[in-house]
Image (spheres, rainbow, N blue to C red):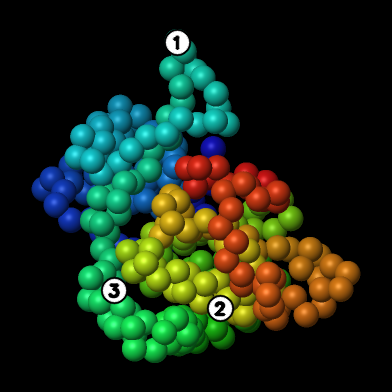
Amino acid sequence: MKNLGSTSHAEAVSPQGLPPGGDGRTRESVARTVLEHGPISAAEVADSLGLSPAAVRRHLDALLAGGQASTRSDPRRGRRGRGRPAKLFLLTEAGRARFGHAYDDLAVAALRFVAESGGEQAVRSFAERRVADMIDRYRATVTAQPGTAGRAEALAVALSAQGYAASTQHAGVGAQLCQHHCPVAHVAAEFPQLCEAETAAFAEVLGTHVQRLATIARGDAVCTTHVPSEARAEGPGEAGAGKTGPGEAGAEQHDSSPTEPTTDPDGGVSA
């Protein structure tokens, strides 16, 4: 079962249009849990919130009926009961939209103008400036932490405060930095320079090369970035791992099945 208690998230994120009163608050909690931890099973949601499985399934069924959630089979657990496949829940695009996006149409139009006026390099410069301004706000807090794992956790907390519902989890030879929400996903879908600049900034502030495995902008359930352990990052000939270069640190490598670690089609991660 996933360790949900240690996950950092932004408390300000809140879906709208829910039923009034306690029922609405419960559904908000269920939706938030699916957003931040999905793909996730109904039993895991119930365990995280301290609710009965029956109560959680009622809210999950409502999210499914409203087109705000979808299900996937869990390949790790095979089949259960009387031949029924185990199910995992995750939010759809409509479900994510309830948690807000920062720019959308206005930002897309603005970046199209930038691209037409100054070309791709102008868009890249804008993306780098945007993420640099964001990273600078919590650079001191992140870099003060000992080790890449500690810095990755501090970065997740800082990103959550910006609305990214981020968390970290151990993954073999390093850690996974998982962003369960992306406030600029619609914009990044057309302008991947935003994701590329973000990845490079992560490498710089963490002091090691990183590998972006998946992004919400490209249709994955979670933006997933692999952060190697110190031993891995400082291997033979890699003393300058904190610096980026072609095909190295900060490079976008969107691969649904890399050698180590891997991500399944539902955004889950396995070492």
Q: Is residue 115 visible?
A: yes
Q: Secondary structure at mark 2?
A: helix
Left or right: where 193 falls relative to 28: right
Q: Secondary structure at mark 1?
A: loop
Displayed quadrant of residue 71: top left
Q: Which residue is mark 2?
A: 201
Estimate how packed mark 1 is, as few (under 14), some (14 to 19) or many (20 or more) residues with alpha carbons within 10 Å: few
Image coordinates for residue 72, horizontal then vertical, percent: 42, 34
Left or right: where 239 falls relative to 42: right
What type is the residue that disc 1 sits on?
Arg
Q: How many marks?
A: 3
What type is the residue that disc 2 sits on?
Ala
* Eye-nearest disc, 3 or 1: 3
The earlier-in-sequence mark between 3 and 1 is 1
Quarter holding the N terminus is top right
Image coordinates for residue 174, horizontal then vertical, percent: 69, 58
Image coordinates for residue 191, horizontal then vertical, percent: 40, 71
**Residue 82 marker:** 1
Real-space Cα separation, disc 2 to disc 3, in angstroms: 22 Å
Q: In this view, which residue lies farthest toward the top? A: 82
Tag 3 near tag 1, CB within 8 Å: no
Real-space Cα separation, disc 2 to disc 1, in angstroms: 49 Å
Left or right: where 141 falls relative to 117: right
The earlier-in-sequence mark between 2 and 3 is 3
Displayed quadrant of residue 189: bottom left
Real-space Cα separation, disc 3 to disc 1, in angstroms: 49 Å
Image coordinates for residue 69, horizontal then vertical, percent: 30, 41
Q: Which residue is mark 3?
A: 108
What type is the residue that disc 3 sits on?
Val
Residue at figure coordinates x 44%, y 74% from the top left: 194
* Eye-nearest disc, 2 or 1: 2
Residue at figure coordinates x 45%, y 51% from the top left: 220
